[in-house]
């Protein structure tokens, strides 16, 4: 079976939107999070999905999904955690308690503010997990890369041929994800920035899946403008 987890815990600090977290802002008259979830629902092969959001926004999120026609009983909105990995842990716990998870089941974890994920990326993640057990969506880096120890002076020029930008989904065999996330202490849960890096550091192979230039993460007002342009060019 296939499951998906939408990470919607952001509060919009870089968006300068203190009253409304960025995932609820609209792009072309539809909230970002709705566009994101719709892509997974329209893919059509998922048994269930879980949306991890701030506890104070659970009812708002539920109402929003209903308002925009996402009414499937297989989508559940739950409270996230104090950081991304705690939210993943909560999502795994909910799905395990409510579905009969097997060793072959796969879960895709995805940012709520990446609304332009496409079916090709989803398919490639699923195929990669079936073969390797874990997958990370990435894109090559085209800019020159440097390193600075103090932010003032150049210390090192970094070869960009083996550098990639991380996107999502990050996808895994469900039971392996649950086992690893539950094994972490509070410090580890707070310090790891993404689950794929946890898998790598625990000795797992993580297959790289090609993402898309359109699969942007909307975190700033500039990103909103880019998102509007992507939609305009796709019509």
Image (spheres, rainbow, N blue to C red):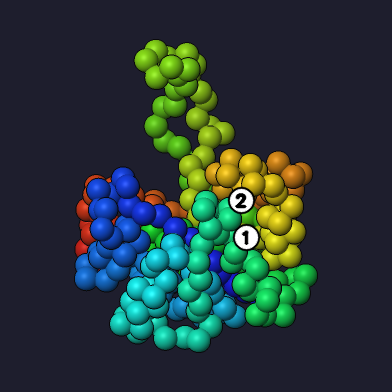
Residue 103, position as x, y percentages in the image: 77, 70
Query: Quick one: 93 or 1, which is closer to the camera?
Result: 93
Residue 166, position as x, y percentages in the image: 50, 46
Residue 73, position as x, y percentages in the image: 50, 86
Sequence-first disc among 2 and 1: 1
In the rendered view, does 79 fall on the left or right side of 231? right
- The image quadrant where one finds the C terminus is bottom left
User: In the rendered view, would you say 217 is above or below 4?
Assistant: above
The residue shown at (38%, 63%) is 115
Residue 114, position as x, y percentages in the image: 40, 58
Residue at which label 1 appears? 89
Q: Which mark is residue 60?
A: none
**Disc 2 crowd, CA 10 A, few/some/many (<14, 14-19, 20+):** many
Query: Quick one: 155 or 18, which is closer to the camera?
Result: 18
In the rendered view, does 176 fall on the left or right side of 194? right
Query: Quick one: 124 or 23, which is closer to the camera?
Result: 23
Which of the 4 image quarters holds residue 224?
A: bottom left
Residue at which label 2 appears? 195
Which of the 4 image quarters holds residue 8?
A: bottom left
Q: Kindly tell me whether residue 216 is visible in this rendering.
A: no
Query: Quick one: 129 or 235, which is closer to the camera?
Result: 129
The residue shown at (53%, 58%) is 81
Q: Secondary structure at mark 1?
A: helix
Q: Kindly tell me whether residue 64 is visible in this rendering.
A: yes
């Amino acid at each position: 079976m296939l499951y998906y987890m939408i990470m919607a815990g952001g509060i919009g600090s870089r968006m300068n939107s203190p009253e409304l977290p960025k995932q609820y802002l609209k792009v072309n008259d539809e909230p970002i999070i709705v566009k994101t979830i719709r892509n997974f629902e329209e893919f059509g092969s998922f048994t269930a999905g879980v949306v991890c959001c701030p506890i104070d926004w659970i009812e708002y999120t539920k109402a929003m999904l209903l308002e925009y026609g996402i009414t499937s009983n297989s989508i559940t909105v739950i409270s996230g955690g104090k950081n991304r990995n705690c939210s993943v842990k909560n999502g795994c716990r909910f799905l395990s308690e409510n579905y009969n998870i097997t060793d072959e089941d796969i879960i895709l974890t995805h940012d709520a503010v990446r609304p332009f994920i496409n079916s090709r990326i989803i398919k490639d993640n699923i195929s990669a997990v079936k073969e390797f057990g874990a997958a990370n969506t990435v894109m090559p880096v085209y800019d020159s890369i440097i390193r600075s120890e103090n932010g003032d002076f150049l210390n090192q020029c970094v070869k960009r041929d083996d550098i990639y930008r991380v996107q999502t989904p990050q996808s895994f065999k469900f039971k392996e994800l649950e086992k690893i996330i539950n094994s972490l202490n509070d410090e580890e849960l707070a310090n790891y920035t993404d689950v794929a890096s946890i898998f790598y550091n625990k000795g797992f192979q993580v297959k790289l899946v090609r993402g898309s230039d359109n699969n942007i993460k909307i975190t700033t007002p500039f990103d909103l403008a880019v998102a509007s342009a992507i939609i305009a060019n796709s019509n």
